[in-house]
Amino acid sequence: MELPGTKFLPARLSRFTTFLLAAGLGLPSAVGSQTAKELIGVACYNELQQRENKTLWSYRAERRIGNHVFLEQVIETVDGPLDRLLAIDGHPPTPAERKEEENRQQELLKNSSGRHAIQKERDDDDRKMAELLGVIPEAFVFEDQGREGESEKIAFHPNPGFKPKTYEQRILHALEGIVLVDLHDQRIVRLSGSLQERVEFGYGLIGHVEQGGTMDIRRIRLAAGVWKISAESIDMEGRLVLLKTIGRHQNESRTGFEPVAADTTYAQALDEIGKK
């Protein structure tokens, strides 16, 4: 069942948090004499190397959107994630809602073009991420703020001398905030930032993202070298071409992570949840 307002809000903004997380990954455990900019440069390089080590997981996602709370079971597969609705505002879905969701899952299972579209989106994300990683060291001014527990704290704000070339770079460059990096695993623990100005595309005729949008992303270590988002709070507004409203007001937490076989397909995951 595709619930109004719950499914995977505007692609450019929803993917953007992934790009931002990549910026802070892989910091060395010893700060030494390196500047904060040099540390971020190493982080971007390390993340590009580490992204090839992909694992699949199952978890419960609690999404707070508007005045409602949606609880889902999510299973990552090689064909993209499979989600199963468990509750709405603490109540199990009605028989009609459950039937609608089953129909949606079966339609995606039969529709190979739909699964291919998911994979193409993933490939596009990988390409865009690589492009953003290449400009991050120049897009910001960084300030090392020292240790915070087992993490290194680095502040970032827009570099006035940087000239963004794409929509994604424009949004990226408007952010200011803090990154916390676990020094043992050299991975990000938290990223918190806000848009410092209104970002316009085509002088506002194509679209815009409003000033003041915020995000707060937290991650946990699941296994050696494996870190996943455990909490996400995003509040952004704007409009894109054809006057479609961008609205991402979402709070999500993820718990109960369990590993999934690396070759798990959508069909296998659907069969698994059908047994429960």
Image: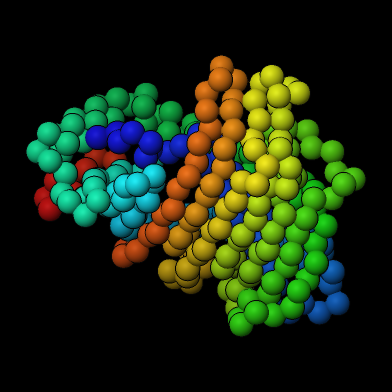
Q: Quadrant of the N terminus?
A: top left
In this view, the residue in front, 160 or 108, is 160
In this view, the residue in front, 128 or 205, is 205
Q: Residue furthest top?
A: 242
229 with respect to 164 (left or right): left
Q: Position of residue 170 (x, y in %)?
A: 73, 38
Is 58 drawn above or below residue 126 in the view shown?
below
Is 64 drawn above or below residue 100 in the view shown?
below
Q: Quadrant of residue 124?
A: top right
Picture colour scheme? rainbow
Q: Residue at image x 48%, y 56%? A: 232
Q: Position of residue 159 (x, y in %)?
A: 84, 50
The answer to whether residue 15 shows anywhere in this view is no
Q: Quadrant of residue 26?
A: bottom right
Is 219 drawn above or below residue 93 in the view shown?
below
Q: Residue furthest front?
A: 67
Q: Residue at image x 44%, y 70%? A: 223
Q: Quadrant of residue 262?
A: bottom left
Q: Residue at image x 69%, y 19%? A: 205
In this view, the residue in front, 4 or 111, is 4
* Total number of numbered discs in the rendering: 0
Q: Residue furthest right?
A: 161
208 with respect to 31 (left or right): left
Q: Position of residue 234 (x, y in %)?
A: 52, 49
The answer to whether residue 161 shows anywhere in this view is yes
Q: Residue at image x 80%, y 50%? A: 158
Q: Position of residue 143 (x, y in %)?
A: 80, 67
Q: Residue furthest bottom?
A: 149
Is 160 drawn above or below residue 30 in the view shown?
above
